[in-house]
Amino acid sequence: MIAFVLALFGVCLLQSAVVPRLAIGGVQPDLFLVLTFGLSLSAGAELATAAGFLIGLYQDSLSGAPLGLNAFTLSLIGFLVNRVSRQVKTAEPAGRFALLFVAGLVSGLTTLLVLRFFQVPRPLAFALLRTVLPGAIYTAVLGAALLAMPKLKAIRGLGR
Amino acid sequence: MTRLLLRYRRTLILSSTLLLSFVLMTLQVRSQSALADLTKQILLTSISPFLRVAAVSKAATVALWNEYIDLRRVRRDNQFLKEEVRQLRAQVGELRETALENYRLSHLLEIRNRVGTEALAAKVIGKDATNWFRTILIDKGANEGIQRHMAVVTPEGLVGRVVDVTALAARVQLITDPESAVGVLIQRSRVAGVAAGSHGGIVQIKYLPLMADVIVGDRVITSGMGGIFPKGIPLGRVLRSSRPTNGALFQETEVQPLAEFSRLEEVVVLKRPPAGDLP
């Protein structure tokens, strides 16, 4: 639990202080998604879902998004990744990358749909091509690299 | 019931979180709920101390990094500036040299105007190679119209006369040369004499009558006698004057030349042709 809180606060700090400097063309990787993904690979579905919810809440509090938007998305991601990871070889970097990429796409699409539901208009094609897709790729690349680092493998073990 | 909850706990938790999220969003988007705002504030409050520490750490890191970068930049700039200073010093030296030369040449031109004759500036390119004579070599010769016996001056005063001429250079006998003789006047008292050089490099005035009015500091100018040197060119100041008691007919007078022979760099050759036929 303490490890999770530390990881969550660490990601909060990194996402708000460091990651914006890594933005390429206005697109930055999503470390909250990476943390949720890492937890989901090792924790049970319930814990991954709850953790996703809490992580999402913190992400909402650090952004201009309506509270609950990312909580909704990351809860879903936590659950789905946990379920899918049983069928995908996530021990392989390529498998992790692919799954993280898909998770990024799903997260982006979900966010886009929820925003549209709440009448927060975003041009669909533009958002898909300029935000969702590049964001998913960037997050997958960075996330896969981070999760491959020996010390950060602990993230995947937070749920154990 | 408990068994049912346990069986569908995953779906239940997922549904709960999704529903809670949806409610929170709805509350905030539709009705600007205080509950959503409060929740957000609590979350932010819990993370803000860490963010503040991170911001301070980041600022410190950035400052440290910038100082490091600045240090590297300063080091590079320092090398660049050193090189620039070296070049500028060289340029300043050249400019100072040019300015001094310009100053000297402008004074030389003043002499030309004062004397009222055509003059030619020349550079000193050599000095006498022996201790027996006091001559200099200038870079103008017959090609520029230089002739023997032409007077040579500096802004300060008389230098000497041309004694040898080649096509591209000329040799000038200084007034300090033992063979030199220049008709002079004591400017104040108008007493005439002949300024002659000596082996010691001192200019002596010969043939000044014993009772002539000469005092230390008197200004000595050319008299125009002899036809080589125009009248009125300053030559020097009386340094020492004495009346011998051994029956001599003339005073012993030493003159300090106004021209600095040890630092001669440019001179002006007065192109006034010598009067009469001189050897």
Image: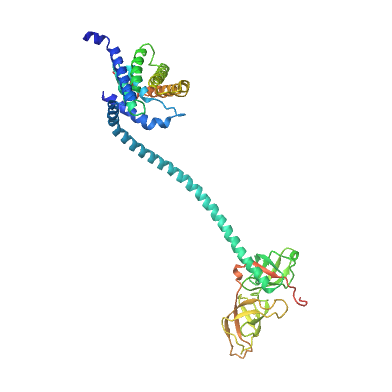
Q: Toward the viewer: B37 or B251?
A: B37
As displayed, is residue B56 above or below residue B166? above
Quarter of the image with the C terminus of chain A in it: top left
Q: Is residue B247 visible?
A: yes
Q: Could you say where residue B53 lies in the image, as x and y percent from the top left? A: 31, 36
Q: Could you say where residue B239 lies in the image, as x and y percent from the top left? A: 57, 80
Q: Toward the viewer: B169 or A141?
A: A141
**Which picture quadrant has residue B277?**
bottom right
**Which picture quadrant has residue B224?**
bottom right
As displayed, is residue B69 above or below residue B161? above
Q: Is residue A157 visible?
A: no
Q: Could you say where residue B152 lies in the image, as x and y percent from the top left? A: 68, 71
Locate residue B216 relative to residue B181 in the image: left or right. left
Q: Could you say where residue A25 lies in the image, as x and y percent from the top left? A: 47, 29
Residue at image position (33%, 21%) is B26
Residue at image position (45%, 46%) is B74
Residue at image position (48%, 46%) is B77
